[in-house]
Every structure is written in structure tokens, then in C-alpha cells.
Image (tube, helix red, strand yellow):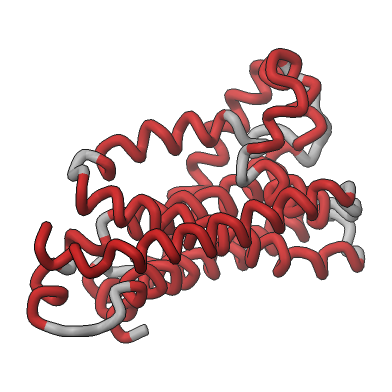
Amino acid sequence: MELARTNLRASNTNTALGQLWLVVNPLLLAGVYFLLVSVLRGGTGGDDVFPKIAAGLFLFFYASGTIQSCATSVTNAGSLILNMNFPKMLLIFSNVYLNFRRFIPTLGVYLVIHIIWQLPWTWHMLLLPVAILLATLVSIGLGAIMATSQVYFRDTAQFLPYFIRIWLYLSPVLYTAEEFLAGPIGARVGELIQVNPMFAVLGIWADALHGILSPWHYFAIAVVWGLGLAIGGVLFFISREREFAVRL
């Protein structure tokens, strides 16, 4: 937690302008994607298109941002690793906590959007923490795998932005999960698109925000991916951490 606070101070996210940028950046992207999607749809899609896109981007950026920061967590902490003996997994948890702190302000912004667009308040919104937890588990697992890969292949972090951009377009962020499956990509790959680790998580997230209970298989897929990646990624990371000091 102290390492995360230090990184927050270093990136100015503990200041008013720093916190504002955490909100303005995804809002601007949401506005850009909203215009793009509106043009592609010809103005159709309902009055709640912008809240859907904003909510999806906020959660997706939390997960992808966590993975990206975890990817370089070990290589950036080379001096710390060489001079101290500590569980290296703490570096991953520190970056998860750091990105969660950055994610919190966006929840307040979405709350304002939810009120302005007069979206429903239902008991299904109690599932929002479940979606956040599942997204966190996916991030921990993939972050640990990327961090380990970065130690052995230093170009991993350079490749990640391209992977994440493709991942964004293969996830129900700009569209709902149902619209995505009925769209051109969904028509080509069919139900196989649901093997995307974030597909079911984002589906649960969007449905809960709009007063809908997601199908049971969304929860099953999300839990399997979340627990599988978290356990597998952590075990993979721990199995290699003794070699980190030699390769840094």
C-alpha cells in the first residue's frame, strides 16, 4: 500500500488536477467512441448509449490499466528486488491497489451520468461489486503472467497496447453483449467470442447497471476465468520469482 501511495504521488494522481485527469481522459474517450458508434448506427441505439459506453470503458480501463502497470512492475523494481528479500507478488498487489484507487473516481463520475440520464435503480446493482471483483481477479492473473513474461522478453510491455486495443474491440464495451453477438464480429465467431475473459464480466456489469439480471452462464464463465487466471497467474509468477534477480 505504501509503494502504491508513492507511485500515486509520483504520477500526481493524489492532486486535484491529477484526479481530474483520471476522470477526464476516459470521459473524452467515451465521447469519441460515442460519436463513432452513433455514426455507425445512424443515430440508433437508444438514449442511453453514452452511459453504456462510459460504464464499459471505465471498467475495461481499470482491468487493462492494471495489467499494463503489472507488466513492468518487476523490471521497474530491479533495484528493490536486488537489495531486499520480500515476496515479489507484493509488486503485483501494489499495482492492483494503485489502479483500484484510480478507478474509484470514475465510479463517482458514472454515478452522475446515471442520475442525469435517469437510468433505473434496481437491486441488480448489488452485483456491481461482483463484476469489479471478477475484473480484478482477471487483472491479477493476466498481470502476473505479463510481469513474468516481461522479465524474460523485454518487448512484452511494448506489445501490450496493441493487444489491449484489439481486446477492447472484441469485448462488449461499445455495444452490449447481446448487440455484440448479433453484430458482424459475433456473426462470424458466434458463441466462441464468450471465451474472452472480460466478455462475461462486462456483460454482468452492463446488465446490472441497467436493471437486468445476466444469464447464469455469464456468471459461470466469469467465475471460471477469474479464479482460473488468478490462481494460474499467481502460481506461474511464484514459480519463476527466484530467477528474477538473476535476469534483471
Residue 69 is situated, as x and y percent measured from the top left of the image, at 33, 57
Q: Residue at x 64, y 67 (%)?
A: 133
Residue 61, placed above or below residue 232? above
Q: Decide if residue 43 is in sight here.
A: no
Give the tally of numbered discs.
Answer: 0
Q: Residue at x 29, y 62 (%)?
A: 240
Residue 43 is situated, as x and y percent measured from the top left of the image, at 75, 21
176 horizontally vs 54: left or right:
right
The quadrant of the rendering that contains the C terminus is bottom left
Residue 87, placed above or below residue 95? below
Residue 201 is situated, as x and y percent measured from the top left of the image, at 69, 51
The image quarter containing residue 126 is bottom right
Q: Residue at x 75, y 46 (%)?
A: 203
158 horizontally vs 134: left or right:
left
Q: Residue at x 18, y 84 (%)?
A: 85
Residue 89 or residue 27, whichever sits in front:
89
Residue 31 is situated, as x and y percent measured from the top left of the image, at 56, 38
Residue 57 or residue 81, whichever sits in front:
81
Q: Decide if residue 146 is in sight here.
A: yes
The quadrant of the rendering that contains the N terminus is bottom left
Residue 166 or residue 79, whichever sits in front:
79
